[in-house]
Amino acid sequence: MGDLKVSMRALATANPSLYVTQAEAVVHYESLFDLQDGERDLYRRLLLDGPIRGRYIGMDSPQEAAETNQDKLVQRYLKFGRQVGSRAVRTAMDQAGLKPDDVGGLVVNSCT
């Protein structure tokens, strides 16, 4: 198979621009959905009791959180995945002083 030479010259991350605190998420979910008391308590515990205080979300507005149309969800994922991914790649390439032709591979991780 030959000698395989791999090197990592840079590492970069990027996030969507919409940042929502966990407290804002609770208020928003409670306004969107008719939650029973037990459900409301569960969402509050899940969102407020952990160490996470907020998160970046690939949406144009928090109102999109209730979207269930699969075609729209896929389009949103593609839109923000491409924006965020290309921003991270450009940052890493700038850090490493590389041009696109210099790159032999790319490792990507995303979270839906």
Image (cartoon, rainbow, N blue to C red):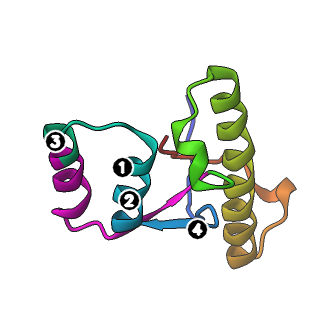
Please state the horizontal and vertical placement of residue 34, each as a whole percent of the image: 35, 36
Tell me which segment is drawn in magenta: 41-58
* CA–CA distance in space, label 1 to label 3: 11 Å
Residue 109: which numbered mark, if any?
none
Task: Tell me if 66 is positioned left or right of 29 in this view.
Answer: right
Residue 1: where, in percent of width, then height?
A: 55, 28
Give the residue at mark 4: 12
| In the image, residue 18 above or below residue 107 | below
* 62 sits left or right of 23 in the view: right
Q: Pointer 2 and pointer 4: residues touching (CB < 8 Å)?
A: no
Task: Name the residue: 73% across, 33% down.
Answer: 75
Look at mark 1 in the image and give the residue it sits on.
30
Answer with mark 1 or mark 3, whichever residue precedes in sequence.
Answer: 1
Horizontal side of residue 102 vs 26, given as left or right: right
**Magenta stretch holds residue 72:** no
Q: Earlier in the sequence, mark 3 or mark 4?
A: 4
> Is 2 situated above or below 12?
above
Near-viewer residue (2 or 95): 95
